Amino acid sequence: MSTAAVVMMIVAMVTVWGGLALAILNLLRHPGQD
């Protein structure tokens, strides 16, 4: 794989997993809010 492909893959993974982690932390911090 080219360097650009690896960089794009890492950026996409960080975006997905980072967003997931933020969502989970948000739910844990504010469990009663919709």
Image: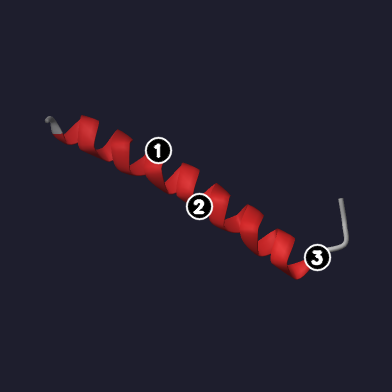
Question: Residue sitting at 64 percent across and 63 percent down?
Answer: 25
| Residue placed under numbered mark 2 in the picture | 18
Q: In which quarter of the image is residue 31?
A: bottom right
Q: Give the color scheme: rainbow, by chain, secondary structure or one colour.
A: secondary structure
Q: Is residue 23 above or below residue 11?
A: below
| Residue placed under numbered mark 1 in the picture | 12
In this view, the residue in front, 18 or 3, is: 18
Q: Where is residue 6 in the image (x, y as percent from the top left)?
A: 22, 37
| 3D distance between C-alphas at marks 2 and 3 | 18 Å
Tell me if label 1 and label 3 are in contact, CB under 8 Å: no
Mark 3 Cα-neighbour bin, 10 Å: few <14, some 14–19, many ≥20: few
Q: In which quarter of the image is the N terminus?
A: top left
Circle nearer the viewer, 2 or 3: 3
Q: Where is residue 16 in the image (x, y as percent from the top left)?
A: 48, 43
| Amino acid beneath label 2 | Gly
Q: In which quarter of the image is residue 32?
A: bottom right
Q: Where is residue 20 in the image (x, y as percent from the top left)?
A: 56, 50
| Amino acid beneath label 3 | His
Tag shown at residue 25:
none
| 3D distance between C-alphas at marks 1 and 3 | 27 Å
Q: Is mark 2 on a helix, strand or loop?
A: helix
| Amino acid beneath label 1 | Ala
